Amino acid sequence: MYGDRNFGERRPMQKFQTVCSDCGKECEVPFKPAEGRPVYCRDCYPKHKKQNF
């Protein structure tokens, strides 16, 4: 009925190796880092997250 569509089947998420802009340690992120934009590791991200008021 839907041809070759695989609804509900998930592919593994692609991870990208990068370096945290804050502490400098290597980390993996689920998106391709854009040049000129900071990327933070799991430990540093909360320090830079915008507050929602």
Image: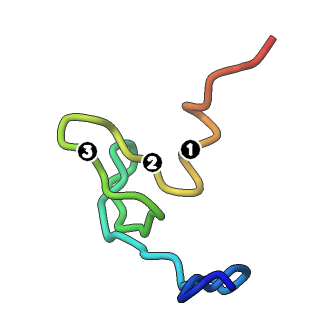
Q: Is residue 32 above or below residue 12?
A: above
Q: Is residue 19 above or below residue 44?
A: below
Type of amino acid under label 1: Tyr
Question: Do tag 1 and tag 3 residues touch (Cβ < 8 Å)?
Answer: no
Question: Do tag 2 and tag 1 residues touch (Cβ < 8 Å)?
Answer: yes
- Real-space CA distance between mark 2 and mark 1, rounded to the nearest whole angstrom: 5 Å
Which residue lies at the image location 30% right of the left edge and 63% below the top edge?
A: 18
Q: Which residue is mark 3?
A: 34
Q: Is tag 1's residue or tag 3's residue first in the polypeptide sequence?
A: 3
Which residue lies at the image location 30% right of the left edge and 59% below the top edge?
A: 19
Which quarter of the picture shows residue 22? Answer: top left
| Picture coordinates of residue 44, whole percent (x, y) | 54, 46
Type of amino acid under label 3: Ala
Q: Is tag 2's residue or tag 1's residue first in the polypeptide sequence?
A: 2
Q: Is tag 3's residue or tag 2's residue first in the polypeptide sequence?
A: 3
- Real-space CA distance between mark 3 and mark 2, rounded to the nearest whole angstrom: 12 Å
| Picture coordinates of residue 49, whole percent (x, y) | 61, 31
Q: Is residue 6 above or below residue 20?
A: below
Q: Secondary structure at mark 2?
A: loop
Depth check, front residue: 34 or 6: 6
> In this image, 33 relative to 12: left or right?
left
Type of amino acid under label 2: Tyr
Q: Quadrant of the N terminus?
A: bottom right
Q: Which residue is mark 1?
A: 45
Which residue lies at the image location 81% right of the left edge and 11% below the top edge?
A: 53
Q: Secondary structure at mark 1?
A: helix
